[in-house]
Image: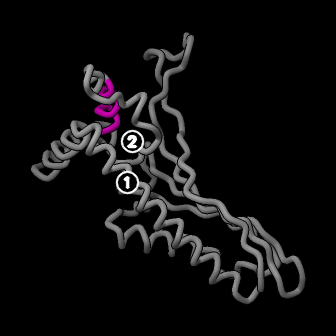
Amino acid sequence: MKNNILILVALLNLPNLAMAKDEPSLLLEGSLSSLIALKENFTIEYSDQVSDGCLPQPSRMKDKMEIVLRQNGFSISQEESLFPNRIKIIALGFATSTSSCAVHLDAELVFWGSVVVPYAQTVPSGPNTFAPITFQIGSIILTGNKNGMQERIEKQVKEFGEILYLSISRAKDDVKEKFPQILDYKAKLDAEKIIK
């Protein structure tokens, strides 16, 4: 957790380093992708709001997401940290007939970032505070046979995991090209962690 806070502090200070005349600005060119580039550890939670037997094994949504992330080198944390990278999978649905279902499936990554509070007078440590930031992974409505709905939902959650992996990989490539000092600083922190 200490390293997460150090990385966060580094990210907050790095925009000043990237403001040279010929270098891109993290604030203006970094976009949301620059904020997800260093995400490597996640907690996964799911919300099952599906009725009428359309999703008989809702915990398998979490399992499918975890498998995809672990296969792609990410770690999954079972314990709550101060500033978690939380993947939320939400399924909402019902039977449309005795043999059919409709399910809305949504996946998002919620993490914390430092934001400026304009005209802040009540934040004691200055004009910044921590706020949750949401990265939308995907959203879809699935309709069809009740017997195959569980499998279709699991397949879609797996695809959401792949989308997240691809988004983070592309963000890392973008940061490497535009803001290499961020990755250099993270490598330095990782090396210090190994030595300790």
Q: Does the magenta segment cover residue 10?
A: yes
In the rendering, at what x and y percent does residue 171 appear? 38, 49
Residue 34: assigned label: 2
Q: Quadrant of residue 50?
A: bottom right
Q: Quadrant of residue 189?
A: top left
Q: Relative to 90, does residue 112 appear above or below in the rendering?
A: above
Q: Name the residue at 71% across, 78% down.
A: 55
Left or right of 176? Residue 74 is: right
In the rendering, at what x and y percent does residue 118 appear? 55, 15
In the rendering, at what x and y percent does residue 64 appear? 51, 75
Left or right of 76? Residue 20 is: left
Q: Main secondary structure of the magenta part?
A: helix
Left or right of 153? Residue 28 is: left
Q: Name the residue at 18% across, 41% down.
A: 184
Q: Name the residue at 89% across, 82% down.
A: 97
Q: How is the image coloured?
A: one colour
Looking at the image, how many numbered discs can be counted on the residues?
2
Which secondary structure lies at badge 1? Answer: helix
Q: Quadrant of residue 66?
A: bottom left
Q: Residues within 10 Å of mark 1 (few under 14, many from 20)?
A: some
Start-end of magenta stretch: 7-15
Which secondary structure lies at badge 2? Answer: helix
Q: CA distance from mark 2 to mark 1?
A: 10 Å
Name the amino acid, label 2.
Answer: Ser
Q: Residues within 10 Å of mark 2 (few under 14, many from 20)?
A: many
- Reading the image, the residue beneath label 1 is 170
Name the amino acid, label 1.
Answer: Arg
Left or right of 192? Residue 106 is: right
